[in-house]
Image (cartoon, helix red, strand yellow):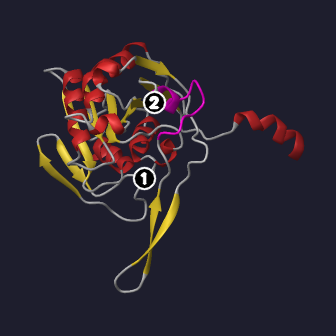
Amino acid sequence: MRILVTNDDGINAPGLKVLEAIAAELAGPDGEVWVVAPAFEQSGVAHKISYTHPMMIAKLGPKRYAAEGSPADCVLAGYYEVLQGAKPDLVLSGVNRGNNSAENALYSGTLGGAMEAALQGLPAIALSQYMGPQTEDMSDPFEPAIEHGVGLVRALLEKGLWDSGDYRLFYNVNFPPVPKDQVKGMKVVSQGYRKDTFFGVEPHISPSGRKFLWIKGGPQHLPTAPGTDVWANLDGWISVTPMRADLTAYDALDALRERLE
């Protein structure tokens, strides 16, 4: 098996090392694991591509590259430049430090990498580790992903739905913020919505007197509706959410046609 690995936390992120180990076990001794990850952290860039300027790519070691771009850029660089168009059997993005459940999925560079892979016709899974009070006490906060990552991906490869449509399926996986022995299993759920949790800005004045704005997130442990991702994660379950890049609101099409056509 040939696996292409990327992330949005950067080439030196501890979660990437976790994912490399997961990929190596999945690929087996005769397989290949190729890493193309951002040279610097790219959290929050979503599905950004560097369309208006070039990016530098550097080989750091055997099958290991850093690119000065987003996770989506890294997938493009990995597929077309590093692998020279040789199709990976699987693209894995992560393991992100922090959850990409609920509205976080819309901002996530981790998901952006998986989404770009899906748009390129490649099977793709984004993986993230929810952080919380319990993970702070672990020797390794990625413990749930380390323990359950290989089994989760294997289950998706063997039993998941893998189509070949125009907007093909990809998967968003979030490991819960609990010790590995408290993980209850996996649940297939929809994307949730944290009510009253929004991104905002916090102003700061620099020593030179200039105003700068920091983007500020909201609480991450507010529950979402039953059957959704945060609800599952906070209850100790690995959430698995099938996604597509098609943003059409199909539930509104008929009503809008009646009003406008």
Kindly identify which residue carries mark 1: 44
Query: Toward the viewer: 98 or 23?
Result: 98
- Quadrant containing the C terminus is top right
Within-10-Å neighbours for mark 2: few <14, some 14–19, many 20+: many
Horizontal arrangement in the rendering, residue 82 relative to residue 158 (left or right): left
User: Is residue 261 visible to the viewer in this orientation of the structure?
Assistant: no
Q: Residue furthest bottom?
A: 208
**Which span of residues is magenta-colored?**
221-234
**Which x, y percent locates residue 34?**
21, 37
Horizontal arrangement in the rendering, residue 233 relative to residue 88 (left or right): right
Secondary structure of residue under mark 2? helix
Within-10-Å neighbours for mark 1: few <14, some 14–19, many 20+: some
- Identify which residue is drawn at 45% across, 29% down: 233
Residue type, mark 1 in image: Gly
Report how many numbered discs are placed on residues in the image.
2
**Which x, y percent locates residue 87?**
32, 32
Q: Nearer the viewer, mark 2 or mark 1?
A: 2
Query: Toward the viewer: 249 or 205?
Result: 205
Secondary structure of residue under mark 1? loop
**Which x, y percent locates residue 226?**
59, 25
Q: Is residue 230 magenta?
A: yes
Q: CA distance from mark 2 to mark 1?
A: 22 Å
**Which x, y percent locates residue 184?**
39, 17
Q: Residue 234: which numbered mark, if any?
A: 2
- Identify which residue is drawn at 56% across, 52% down: 198
User: Is residue 259 visible to the viewer in this orientation of the structure?
Assistant: yes
Residue 133, image quadrant: top left
Q: Is residue 81 magenta?
A: no
| Upstream in sequence: badge 2 or badge 1 | 1
- Quadrant containing the N terminus is top left
- Identify which residue is drawn at 42% across, 83% down: 210
Residue type, mark 2 in image: Leu
